[in-house]
Image (tube, helix red, strand yellow):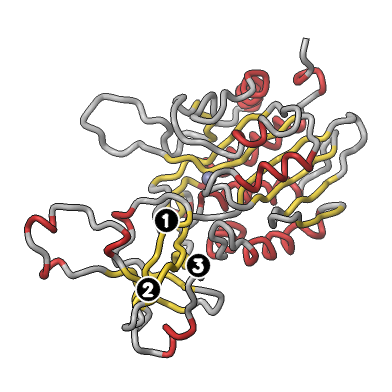
Amino acid sequence: MNELLKQLTEAVGVSGAEKEVRLLIRDLIADHVDEWSVDSMGNLLATRRGTGQYDMRILVDAHMDEVGLLITDIDSGGMLSFVGAGGFDDRALLGKVVQVGPDKITGVIGARAVHLLSNNEYSRTVRTDAMRIDVGAKSEAAAKVKIGDYAAFVTEYEELDGGRTAIGKAFDNRAGCAALVELLRGERYPFDLIASFTVQEEVGLRGAEVAAYNAKADAALVLECTPAYDLPNEKDASPNVALGKGASVYVMDSRTIQDPRLVAHLMATGDARGIRYQVRQPGGGGTNTGAIQRAGAGIPVATLAVPGRYAHTPTMMISLDDYESVVRLADAALRSLTPEIIRRR
Ligand SMILES: [Zn+2]
């Protein structure tokens, strides 16, 4: 069992309310870093000093927030209305168990039962405004909930397929957080490594904007979990990324063209070390790379991601082999990164 992934995915940290997961990560890294701090937005920043070989500061980022819900209203029967904190798939919500507010009150996301719908209603997707979180209505539980409280999904981490596949919530992006924790626990790098576990990525890359400004980095690497779309398809089309085919290397998304020198370095490292990677099809989506690349006077940046199925739903699936590939490739690429690679001519 990968205890790191279990602990990190089961921790709660919806965008804007990341305290629980931040404290967990702080405890996981505190003995392995030279200093850590929390900035005004709640980003956890840590420094692991290098061996002194290169006078460089390299930022490695993983956002720690997850998508979840925010309570907007409580009706007289104790039913909770909500909106999303971060974008997610409305279709995946009905019937899911959530934990609401700091007291973690258990509720279930409900809507009118299928028996009570007209054919016309049944054929339409139920939107979140027609759903409610039901905490047992007239119980004391509802009285403990306040407007503005967060609700997070409850999904236990499990390993399948002889331990090579895992399901759980928030692999986006606790998989990236776990990988970054592993990097901080390894041998020192030839340069100072600045780690940022950032907040509010899912609502618009907000934490990274502040963290990257502070980091004053010479280059950066973002660790992420990217949606895998490799399910049966009517068309003969290659998937953007597939589960089990290795670490996913970004080239371009809706927010960035990744630094080509770093992209080439990641691929060359994978080839030289025999670490499996796949190139993510250029296209939509966005990561903290978008904020980091344009922070201050600009920072060369690239993204490495664990492919995950069913992103932005209460249960995702990843391959633990892909996760290992991300850790190994990030580590090897960082160890072989030289000032020469990022010098502009
Ligand atoms: Zn993400």
The residue that disc 1 covers is 160
**Along the line of sight, the residue nearer the viewer: 210 or 43:** 210
Write the residue at 68% across / 47% down. Answer: 180
The residue that disc 3 covers is 150
Q: Earlier in the sequence, mark 3 or mark 2?
A: 2
- Find residue 274 and report its horizontal and vertical position in percent: 60, 27
- Find residue 94 and report its horizontal and vertical position in percent: 29, 63
Write the residue at 43% across / 77% down. Answer: 106
Quadrant containing the N terminus in the rendered view: bottom right
Does residue 140 appear to the left or right of 299 in the view shown?
left
Q: Secondary structure at mark 2?
A: strand
User: CA–CA distance between discs 3 and 2?
Assistant: 11 Å
Q: Earlier in the sequence, mark 2 or mark 1?
A: 2
Which image quarter: residue 84? Answer: bottom left
Q: Secondary structure at mark 1?
A: strand
Give the mark toward the camera: 1 or 3. Answer: 3
**Along the line of sight, the residue nearer the viewer: 225 or 272:** 225
In the rendered image, the residue lying farthest to the left is: 119
Residue 228's place in the image compared with 44, above or below, is above
What's the residue type where badge 1 is placed? Leu
Does residue 184 appear to the left or right of 159 in the view shown?
right
Q: Residues within 10 Å of mark 1 (few under 14, many from 20)?
A: few
The residue that disc 2 covers is 80
Write the residue at 54% across / 30% down. Answer: 255
Marks 3 & 2, CB-CB < 8 Å contact: no
Q: Earlier in the sequence, mark 1 or mark 3?
A: 3
Q: Secondary structure at mark 3?
A: strand
**Along the line of sight, the residue nearer the viewer: 146 or 63:** 146
User: CA–CA distance between discs 1 and 3?
Assistant: 30 Å
- Whether residue 104 is visible here, answered yes or no, is yes
